[in-house]
Amino acid sequence: MFPAGFSGAFDVNNYPMTRKSSGSGSIDLAAIAHQAMIDNGFVPDIPRSVMDELRSLQKKSQPVVADSSIRDLRSLLWSSIDDRKSRDLDQVEYAEELAGGDVRVLVGIADVDGIVKKGSAIDEHAATNATSVYTGVRMFPMLPEELSTDKTSLIGGADRTSVVTEMIVATDGTVKSNNIFRALLHNHAKLSYEAVGAWLDDRGPMPPEIARVPGMDAQIRLQFEAAQRLRQLRREHGALELETIQASPLWITRAKLLTLR
């Protein structure tokens, strides 16, 4: 649940043109974003109690397979796909073709609870904000970046514990069965939407992250096939598809915007 009164979007027009203390007259958009967070019920600054707790967690590493309930799936060709610049990777995928044309799809979600315990200072701060907030000029993370972009991130080339959802997708897109379990996995390829999309649409070369891992090209195409099946079934059931455009700001300085692209 988001903080009370949160509308889902920040309107900079609601805030005075905050000036930088240097007297240059330029608008301090970072200060506006910070104040907007406060006015909408968020906590923009990470409390000291969270930082103290974080320092103790930095000495810990994610567990290897010692618990018999955690499956070791590091040998599977897991991959992540996100924005090219993203480092907070919370999901990885794997697909396997079965007899009769079914596809076994595994989706691994970062197991933050393996490090951040319920009721801890970090957990309480995350519960207050409930989400990371992207304001364009600055990102306010739900978790400290030392966790969200490292210790709990499913970063490429690292072993991580994960909560895995298993689905058997039939040729018509129906999900025949599902299961949830914990597993240790390894992200073999950190991919981006832009590069993979262009490759699958025959508008660009195979991304090097795919080319360097034997079997990864067939793996990604199988994932794409499973996604197409699910998408077609959604369409048949009347799902709406909304196209949105996300602009990236290009800054001259911290407070001076050049353009959007």
Image (cartoon, helix red, strand yellow):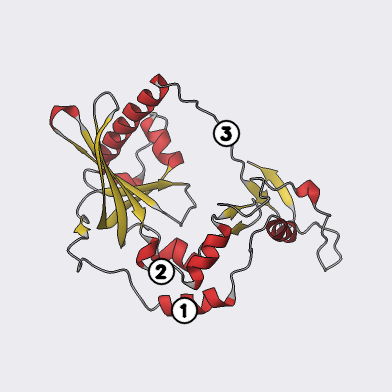
Horizontal arrangement in the rendering, residue 149 relative to residue 14 (left or right):
left
* Front disc: 3 or 2: 2
Q: Quadrant of residue 74?
A: bottom left
Q: Residue 127's mark?
A: none
Which residue matches tag 3?
Answer: 244
Q: For the residue carrying disc 3, how many other residues have a C-alpha within 10 Å: few (<14), some (14-19), or many (20+)?
A: few
Inter-mark Cα distance, 3 to 2: 36 Å
Mark 1 or mark 3: name the one nearer the start of the chain.
Answer: 1
Between 209 and 71, the one nearer to me in the picture: 71
Q: Position of residue 151 (x, y in %)?
A: 39, 66
Residue type of the residue flagged with mark 1? Arg
Q: Position of residue 97 (x, y in %)?
A: 19, 35
Residue type of the residue flagged with mark 3? Thr
Q: Residue 117's mark?
A: 2
Report helix, strand or loop for mark 1: helix
Report helix, strand or loop for mark 2: loop
- Total marks shown come to 3
Which residue matches tag 1?
Answer: 55
- What's the residue at 64%, 52% (across, down)? 135
Between 146 and 254, the one nearer to me in the picture: 146
Q: Is residue 182 above or below residue 248?
A: below
Residue type of the residue flagged with mark 2? Lys
Q: Position of residue 70 (x, y in %)?
A: 22, 60
Mark 2 or mark 1: name the one nearer the start of the chain.
Answer: 1
- Asked whether the beta carbons under mark 1 and mark 3 sit within 8 Å of each other, the answer is no
Inter-mark Cα distance, 1 to 3: 39 Å
